[in-house]
Image: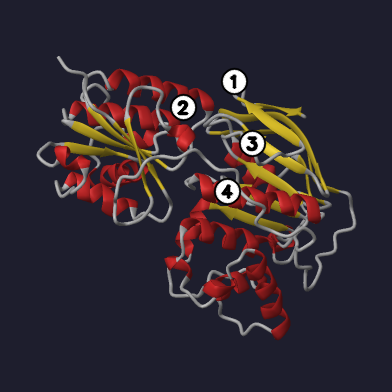
Amino acid sequence: MEPLEHWGIFLSNQVDKNAFIETILSGASRTELSTFNTKKGILFSDIAIDNFIKKEYQYDTVETSFETPRKLRTFSSGERKKVFLNYCIDQEPDYIIVDNPLDHLDQKSRNTITIILQELAQKTQLILLVNRQSDLVPFQVKKAHIKDNSFVLNEIKPIIKAQDLFKANSIPPPLDPIIFSEEVLIKMNNLCVSYHEKPILNNINWTIKKGDFWHLLGPNGSGKSTLLSLITGDNTKGYGQDLYLFGMKKGSGENIWDIKKNIGYFSTAMTDLFQKNDSLEQMVLSGFFDSIGLYTQPTVLQKNIVSQWLELLHLSPLKNKPFKTLSIGQQRLALIVRAVLKHPPLLILDEAVEGLDDENVAMVAQLITLLSQETNMAILYVSHRIEPNIIPNTVYELTPNTTGSTGIVRN
């Protein structure tokens, strides 16, 4: 029997991925992928998993596989991918479109998924879609690069080292500096968190000071999100514990907005919040008012600061373009700038490069590096990946165990 032919396709962020996937699944491909036009396919992706979970909630009868009675939503993110992949296999398709299977996974789960795909490739054709060349699987695939919505299959070329995109000493100053005189921003002493008697965090000791650059690292389910919610003041589990947020002991009568004004926050989920027709300039300006959308007339000085930021990012020509129509990389840069407009004492970047292609990763990495070098903001970078172009000074690593995750500091 002849070996099966697989594809590994590197997608730029400019490509309408959903339209490309629909072209394949509907049998409308006009490229070399037309060999799949008469075959039965299925999609394995984060979006497909989310849609499956929505059906579980809607009908409460959907099962993830013939062997597993548990609902998909009850699994951790890493296990969820493995279980849903088994579900896709059980449908006995001729091929499976595998969309960025390693996203949002820790290294152990990435290795497990890679092994599963290697075994699957022995019996089922795969079309692997990735945004990072490093995520292409180690087994034999026909490789191609799709750059735009023509969906033309181009040859993959080696990654070229990114040029310096931003000038040194070019970070616009804050309009109204947030004054916080103390050196220590966050201090945790022997913090413990559990939910329904299940331990999540155990004896966490961590201090974040002005100007620090941290990488928060830990496998799926280790409690990173819980730790972030303690820092932002949103988690009620911080009450009654030895937790200090910007000089205030949690539960001492502090106002939640007194905490949040000191934090700039970015997460990939924020992109979905800006779906109206606000322009790029308006979206960034909304950072001055901590609003989703611009509902207050900005001052001339505020508009001037935003103009300086857009010039730094080479986005000035796009300032009147609707934010939602920008490329994902441009949106990511703008959202990070929105978070740092006021130079908050602490900047949290949650999965800042997840879902970006190599070119956009390099662009965002340069911005993060510039912020770390030219401001006194403490930066807390949260990611499963070790990015060679993002170099925090210190790592806080969570290690799960049965009594709750413990944390260690690594340089």
Residue under pointer 1: 401
* Residue density around tag 4, few if under 14, some if 14–19, many if 20 or more, within 10 Å: many
Task: Name which residue type carries label 4.
Answer: Ala
The image quadrant that residue 181 belongs to is: bottom right
Q: For the residue carrying disc 3, how many other residues have a C-alpha within 10 Å: few (<14), some (14-19), or many (20+)? A: few
- Nearer to us of marks 1 and 2 is 2
Which percent across, then down, holds residue 98?
32, 36
Comparing 64 with 128, the one in front is 128
The residue under the point 46% across, 65% down is 326
Q: Secondary structure at mark 3?
A: loop
Across and down, in percent, residue 408 comes to 73, 26
State left or right for residue 348 relative to residue 173.
left
- The Cα atoms of the two marked residues, 4 and 1, are separated by 27 Å
Where's the N terminus, which quadrant? top left
**Depth order, front residue of 258/314:** 314
Q: Residues within 10 Å of mark 1 (few under 14, many from 20)?
A: few
Q: Which residue is mark 2?
A: 110
Task: Between label 3 and label 1, give the one nearer the viewer.
Answer: 3
